Amino acid sequence: MIRVRAQLGDGRTSIEVTGHEEHAEGGRICAAVSAITQTALLGLQMIAEQYPDLVSAEITQES
């Protein structure tokens, strides 16, 4: 099961996506969720690069 948790409040948003598809759909749902999430992150990163005085994006990868 893929779980998406979002918290909204006082000018901030937190999104956490965990899990993996364990259905016979061949990973299509997992791929779709990953693509949407990664596209959002890349878009935010690009905005931060264009407007560094207004937006800061810190995206890290766990090892």
Image (spheres, grey):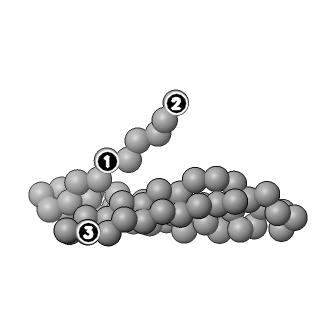
| Relative to 57, residue 43 above or below | below
Instruction: Look at mark 1 in the image and give the residue it sits on.
Output: 58
Disc 1 packing (10 Å; few <14; some 14–19; many ≥20):
few
Q: Residue at x 74, y 59 (%)?
A: 21
Res. 38 in view? no
Q: Residue at x 64, y 60 (%)?
A: 2
Of the image marks 1 and 3, the number of the one nearer the N terminus: 3
Of the image marks 3 and 2, the number of the one nearer the N terminus: 3
Q: Is residue 33 left or right of residue 44?
A: right
Instruction: Label 2: state its secondary structure.
Output: loop
Return the x and y of residue 44 as percentages of the image width and height. Answer: 35, 63
- The N terminus: image quadrant: bottom right
Q: Residue at x 82, y 63 (%)?
A: 23
Instruction: Label 1: state its secondary structure.
Output: loop
Residue type, label 2: Ser
Q: Which one is in front, 42 or 6?
A: 6
Instruction: Look at mark 2 in the image and give the residue it sits on.
Output: 63
Instruction: Label 3: state its secondary structure.
Output: strand
Q: Which mark is residue 9?
A: 3
Return the x and y of residue 25 as percentages of the image width and height. Answer: 83, 68
Q: Are marks 3 and 2 in contact (CB under 8 Å)?
A: no
